[in-house]
Amino acid sequence: MRILFPVAVMSVAVAATPAAADWRYCLARGPARTVYLSAPFPTVAAMPTLDAAFGRMLDRTQRPHDPVQCPRADDAASLRAMRLTALRYNRQDGETVVELDWTPDRDAAKR
């Protein structure tokens, strides 16, 4: 016997299930040995959406840049450790690291 669920019931079940958030920060290389790093943030957004949003903010603030990356971690502590490693590595490599107080939520609120 096959059991069918009404569409409305299935929608409620899907809406009630919270999506697991990733922790991310975004970074991009700029000219003259510069690296831009965002603040860490939790998100359920897809990586291409985040890459594009950080890139648009860099464009809006007239910061030329290479392609954006937004590394992920399962929790805030892991992401902070990853970001700190990237920050230290780039500074030791002679890069100027520019930390930006940017998250997708803050960016959307400014528009």
Image (tube, grey):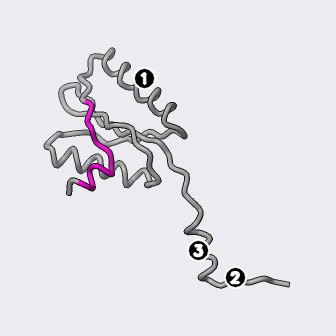
Report the front residue among 89 and 81.
Answer: 81
Which of the 4 image quadrants contains residue 90? top left
Rendering coords of residue 106 (x, y %): 28, 49
SS for dot 2: loop
Identify the disc placed on residue 85.
Answer: 1
Q: Which mark is residue 5?
A: 2
Q: Mark 3 or mark 1, which is nearer the start of the sequence?
A: 3
Q: Is residue 25 left or right of residue 109?
A: right
The structure residue drawn at horizontal position 50% and vertical position 46%, both measured from the top left corner, is 22
Label 2 amino acid?
Phe
Nearer to us in this view, 32 or 21: 21
Residues shaded magenta:
99-109
**Residue 54 on image: x %, y %:** 29, 46
The quarter of the rendered structure image containing the N terminus is: bottom right
Structural crowding at the residue carrying mark 1, measured as other residues with C-alpha within 10 Å and reported as few (<14), some (14–19) or many (≥20): few
Residue displayed at 37% across by 19% down = 88
Q: Give the residue drawn at x 59%, y 62%.
A: 17
What residue is disc 3 on? Answer: 12
Q: Is residue 99 left or right of residue 73?
A: left
The quadrant of the rendering that contains the C terminus is bottom left
